[in-house]
Amino acid sequence: MAEGKTQQTDGPATKPIPVKPAVEPMSDKDEAPPGTPGTGETIDPKTGETYVQGIGGA
């Protein structure tokens, strides 16, 4: 082999690392994904659950 070259193998070098999604999955009450402009987090007074709700606009 020439200098500066590495030997390649047929398989992957390492195991893939599980990646956590950047955005949490939406709940049934969510009207839009978290962080969407024109939305805000609301708390359901009966259950205490939080969800994303549109706050109006044009």
Image (cartoon, rainbow, N blue to C red):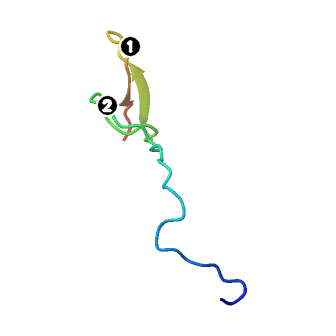
Residue 1 falls in which quadrant of the image?
bottom right
Q: Residue furthest right?
A: 3
Circle 2 sits in a helix, a strand or a loop, which is it? loop
The percent coordinates of residue 12 (x first, y second) are: 49, 65
The percent coordinates of residue 24 (x first, y second) are: 41, 37
Left or right: where does residue 45 sit relative to residue 8? left
User: Which mark, residue 27?
Assistant: 2
Of the pair 47 and 19, the residue shown nearer to us: 19
Left or right: where does residue 22 sit relative to residue 33? right
Within 10 Å of the Cα at label 2, are there few (<14), some (14-19), or many (20+) other Cα atoms? few
User: Which mark, residue 48?
Assistant: 1
Q: Label 1 is placed on what type of residue?
A: Gly
Left or right: where does residue 52 sit relative to residue 1? left
Q: Label 2 is placed on what type of residue?
A: Ser
The percent coordinates of residue 20 (x first, y second) are: 47, 43
The percent coordinates of residue 7 (x first, y second) are: 60, 78
Q: Residue at x 66, y 83 (%)?
A: 5
Of the pair 35 and 28, the residue shown nearer to us: 28
Q: Is residue 19 above or below residue 8?
A: above
Of the pair 52 and 57, the residue shown nearer to us: 52
Within 10 Å of the Cα at label 1, are there few (<14), some (14-19), or many (20+) other Cα atoms? few
